Every structure is written in C-alpha cells, then in structure tokens.
C-alpha cells in the first residue's frame, strides 16, 4: 500500500508539473472574474454593462504590468503574451460596441428608474410596489411618445436600428427576470405589478419591433441577393489581423489566395482529364455531384469515409488518436432550418449531417444531396472528426485546459484544413472523383479568402460573392447563397473567420516544414500541437521552436505563402 501511495504521489506531481507555469492561476482568475461579471451584469446592451467591463479590462491591464515578465518560464511568457493580447482584443471590440451603443442610447433615456429596479433586485431589495407600478405606467406612456417622434426620424441604416432594438430587448429581458423574482413571493408586489408589468412588457416588444424596422430603406443597397451586411473596412481588418499575429495586409492575403486558387483550378482540370472530360472541369464536377447516396444512406457513407481516413492516417503513424476519442464521437442529423445557413455537415463533439428531409422542395433536396455527395465529403469527414475538430476538442479537455480563453479559428479551423493539405500530399484520394472532391473544398477555402476580404473591403457585393462560388468554384446556387448569408448577414462569423481556414492551414504547414528541418518527425509535431491547446499559430511557433518570447511580441512571422 505504501508503495502504491508513493507511486500515486509521483504521478500526481508529474501530472501537475505538465501545467506548472506561473500564469495558470492568473489566467484562471481572469476567466473566473469575467464569468462572475457576465453572470451579474447580464443586461448586455446597457451603459452599466459597458462601463463595468471597461473598468474590468483597465484593472487587468494594471495587474499584468505588476507581473515580473523576465522571471517567467517559457510557457509563462507565452501565456502572458496571449493574455495581454486577449485583454487588448476584447477591450477593443467592447469599445467598438460601446460606441455603437452611444449613438442610439437615446431610445432608452426614459428608463433610469427601470434599470434601478433591476439593479436592486440583485440583492432582493423589497420595492415600493405602488410607486413601481406608477413607474412602469409612466414608462409605457413615454414609449408611445418615442414611437410617435421617431416615425419621422429614421435611423440612417439597419445596423443602428438593430442596435437600438437590441437595447430594448435587453431591457425587456432584465425586467422580466426581476419581475419573476418578486411575483407570487411578495403579495404587495403581485397585487400592484401584475397588470402594469404585462402592459409594459407588450409595449417594449412593440417598441423593439418598431425600432428594428425604423431605418432608411435607401441605406439597404440590396444588390438583388437579399443579403444585407455591413463591410467592416480595411482599418478594422488590419486591427483584427494584428490580434491574430498575422503580419499581412488584406491585399497580400487575397494575392496568396488567388495563387492557390489558380493551382487548384489546374489540378481540377487534371482530374477532369482523368475522368474523360478533357479541360471541362465543370462537367467533371457535375458528374461528381451526381454520385450522391440515396436518402437514409448518408450516415452509412459518413462512417465508411471515417474508417478509411483513420486507417490511412494510422497506417502511416502520423498522429496519436486515443481509443476513447474514436469510441465516443457522436452523430446527429442537421435540422432543415439549420441547413438554410449551413448546407454542409459540421462537426466537433459530434458530426452533424446535412441531408434532405421529406418536407423540402424537390430542387432543394437535389441540391442538398448533390452538395453532400461522398466525394465532396471525402476530405471533410476527417476535418470534422479525426484528426480534426473532434480530436481537438478531446485533447483540449485533457491538455492545458486553462488556455481555452485563447480560442482562435486560425488554430481551430486552420488545423483541420492543414490535414486536407497533408493528406493530399500523401496521395489520400484513390480516384479522380475523390481528387475532384478534395479540390472542390480546397478551392472553396481559397474563394472564401477572396470573396470575404473583397466584401469587407467594400469592393464586392454579396451577389458578386455568390456568383463567384457558383461560376468559379462550382457550388449549387442555394448552397452558395447560404454560404454568403452565413458570412455576412448573421452573427455566426466574425470578419476573419472565413479566411482563417486556409491561412491557418498555411501557418501550420509552414511551421511543420520548419520543424521537420530541425529533425522532428511528423508525429512528434502533430502530437505536440495537440498538447499545447489553442492559441494563435505564431505564438505556438515560439513555444515549439524554443524561441525568445518578447514581452510586447507583435506579428512578425512571415510564414510561407506558397504550398501545394
């Protein structure tokens, strides 16, 4: 027993030493502090929220200055740089939102007493119910006056209207939570407040709906696609690239993508010739689209593709895939509603399969089946499962989980895309149809960089983006429209998300090549990446190559822009 306890003690010490650096508690405290604030200040669109979070970030900037950076270990220095960058990034984004809030905050200038009620509820202060009922009644009247006045004073664009409506919806949710706290538990409150609350709640709903539509329709500039977004502009793109430690301009990234796009097109023509279609890659792609499986057979096809990809990877000993990870991934079917904005399957802890349902229109069914044929799915099952997203999630829970705050799509999506590059180089596709499937997704990633950046720079319209995906990549129209809508007209994707796949993959590929030159094996590199958790790839490079980490490290790694 004594020997067993001794061995257990040694194991615990060794396990702890894996994570032993001076910044772990600091990062965990930052995350815990932020969670505590989010739980307390849950009315996001309010002056109180923005001011409190500004205080939070300012205080944390001071805390970081008090840390002896030179006394930190290598891991500690990396985590310091990551935390400092995260604080600066979140503060920058918060202030952007706050400026937008200030521009339309007048829509809620009648609500000081309502906010006081919400704030006092946090400590259960018993309200003067009679006076509060009058406050609610007065607020309802002021809203009616606001609506009347604003009918002749439209917002200049839909973004301001959307922000104004969000402020009211946020207030409505806060009042609802506070009301439910007292209702039925406080007899005096219940007697006085039931009718005034219900009436104000309905008026707030009416007000928010009015605000969301009260903007100049001339500002929409619908190009016929029905997709209305708002380009962020070059300055914001560059700022976001700095936070990802990427020292390239949008124009340089577009140039890189165009070069890769041309390479993909040339390879698609080669595959088309193998299939007997000559230079007509579009005809070859049409043939591949029609290799879809029958309704009900898609899960079986996904399983077959998964088994093949894992066998291929393990036969070449490229990375460690734990048996439990292979045992515990799941599978669900994507809802028809979700398929409208994401026409292809997605993955993570489980793979979400996009395939037609009985209630879809006939043409939509065919487009879904054609867009999710096995050859298109051939390179993406491993992207979503192993060694892509599912393995990332599995390993992140078990290795340096405190780094979860440093999430970035350049690591998450870049890693999964990197494997598509590696597998192509190792002759993963067995047939020209599978080659075409891999190339379709690879050229799609290049197109994402081009159309998303040109849109965000104000050079392209949503319709031009759709046309490119249809004419130059080969997408079904409905799938291309859903891709563009998801990119620009929803909150799903930040401005750099679409380019993060290929650029992140390029970063991993460049880092791999640097380490192979230092006599690392591919498996050593892949396993080490999975044990460092997520972070911008440029910072990961400093750790893996044991380079000096400056306290004020900025983007300076000019990773290779050419890969095949």
Image (cartoon, rainbow, N blue to C red):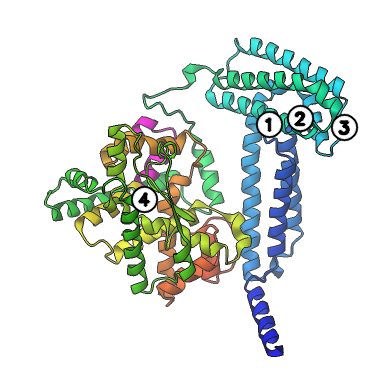
Q: Which mark is residue 309?
A: none
Q: Is residue 94 left or right of residue 195?
A: left
- Element at badge 3? loop
Q: Which residues are magenta?
A: 445-465
Mark found first going from the N terminus, 2 or 1: 1
Q: Estimate the x, y position of residue 258 in percent, counting from the top left.
A: 32, 47
Can residue 558 be seen at all in this image of the molecule? no
Q: Is residue 11 above or below residue 352?
A: below
Q: Is residue 17 left or right of residue 273?
A: right
Mark found first going from the N terminus, 1 or 4: 1
460 magenta-colored: yes
According to the picture, the residue beneath numbered tag 4 turns out to be 256
Q: Quadrant of residue 382?
A: bottom left
Q: Which mark is residue 173?
A: 1
Disc 2/disc 1 C-alpha distance (Å): 10 Å
Kindly report which numbered mark, 3 or 4, lies closer to the viewer in this rendering.
Answer: 3
Q: Give the residue drawn at x 48%, y 54%.
A: 410
Kindly report which numbered mark, 1 or 4, lies closer to the viewer in this rendering.
Answer: 1
Query: 10 Å neighbourhood of mark 3: few (<14), some, or many (≥20)?
Result: few
According to the picture, the residue beneath numbered tag 3 turns out to be 126
Q: Estimate the x, y position of residue 29 in percent, counting from the top left.
A: 73, 57
According to the picture, the residue beneath numbered tag 2 turns out to be 179
């Amino acid at each position: 027993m004594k020997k067993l306890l001794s061995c257990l003690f040694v194991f615990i010490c060794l396990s702890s030493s894996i994570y032993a650096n001076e910044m772990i508690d600091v990062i965990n405290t930052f995350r815990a502090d932020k969670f505590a604030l989010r739980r307390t200040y849950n009315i996001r669109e309010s002056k109180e929220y923005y001011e409190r979070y500004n205080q939070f970030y300012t205080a944390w900037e001071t805390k970081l200055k008090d840390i002896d950076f030179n006394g930190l270990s290598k891991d500690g220095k990396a985590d310091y740089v990551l935390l400092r960058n995260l604080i600066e990034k979140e503060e920058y984004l918060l202030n952007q939102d706050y400026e937008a809030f200030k521009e339309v905050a007048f829509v809620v200038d009648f609500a000081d007493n309502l906010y006081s009620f919400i704030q006092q509820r946090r400590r259960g202060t018993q309200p003067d119910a009679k006076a509060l009922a009058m406050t609610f009644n007065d607020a309802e009247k002021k809203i009616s006056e606001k609506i009347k006045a604003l009918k002749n004073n439209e917002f200049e664009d839909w973004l301001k209207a959307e922000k104004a409506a969000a402020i009211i919806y946020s207030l409505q949710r806060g009042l609802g939570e506070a009301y439910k706290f007292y209702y039925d538990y406080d007899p005096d409150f219940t007697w006085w407040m039931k009718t005034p609350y219900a009436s104000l709640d309905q008026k707030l709903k009416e007000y928010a709906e009015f605000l969301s539509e009260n903007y100049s329709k001339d500002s929409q500039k619908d190009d016929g696609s029905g997709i209305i977004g708002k380009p962020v502009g070059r300055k914001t793109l560059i700022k976001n690239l700095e936070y990802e430690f990427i020292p390239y301009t949008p124009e340089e990234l577009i140039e890189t993508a165009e070069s890769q796009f041309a390479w993909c097109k040339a390879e698609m023509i080669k595959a088309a010739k193998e299939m007997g279609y000559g230079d007509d890659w579009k005809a070859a792609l049409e043939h591949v689209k029609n290799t879809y499986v029958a309704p009900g057979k898609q899960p079986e096809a996904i399983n077959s593709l998964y088994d093949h990809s894992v066998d291929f990877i393990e036969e070449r000993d490229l990375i460690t895939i734990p048996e439990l990870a292979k045992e515990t991934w799941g599978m669900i079917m994507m809802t028809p509603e979700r398929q409208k904005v994401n026409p292809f399957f997605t993955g993570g802890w489980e793979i979400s399969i996009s395939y037609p349902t009985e209630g879809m229109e006939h043409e939509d069914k065919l487009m879904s089946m054609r867009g999710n044929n096995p050859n298109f799915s051939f390179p993406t099952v491993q992207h979503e499962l192993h060694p892509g997203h599912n393995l990332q999630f599995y390993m992140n829970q078990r290795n340096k989980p405190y780094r979860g705050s440093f999430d970035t799509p350049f690591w998450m999506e870049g890693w999964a895309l990197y494997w598509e590059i590696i597998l192509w180089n190792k002759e993963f596709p067995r047939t020209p149809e599978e080659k075409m499937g891999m190339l379709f997704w690879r050229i799609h990633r290049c197109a994402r960089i081009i159309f998303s950046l040109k849109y965000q720079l104000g050079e392209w319209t949503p319709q031009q983006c759709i046309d490119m995906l249809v004419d130059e990549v080969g997408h079904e129209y409905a799938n291309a429209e859903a891709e563009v809508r998801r990119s620009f007209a929803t909150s799903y994707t930040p401005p750099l998300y679409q380019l993060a796949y290929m650029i992140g993959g390029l970063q991993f590929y460049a880092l791999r090549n640097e380490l192979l030159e230092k006599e690392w094996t591919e498996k050593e590199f892949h396993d080490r990446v999975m044990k460092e958790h997520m972070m911008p790839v440029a910072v990961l490079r400093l750790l893996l190559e044991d380079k000096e980490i400056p306290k004020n490290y900025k983007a300076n790694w000019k990773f290779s822009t050419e890969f095949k």
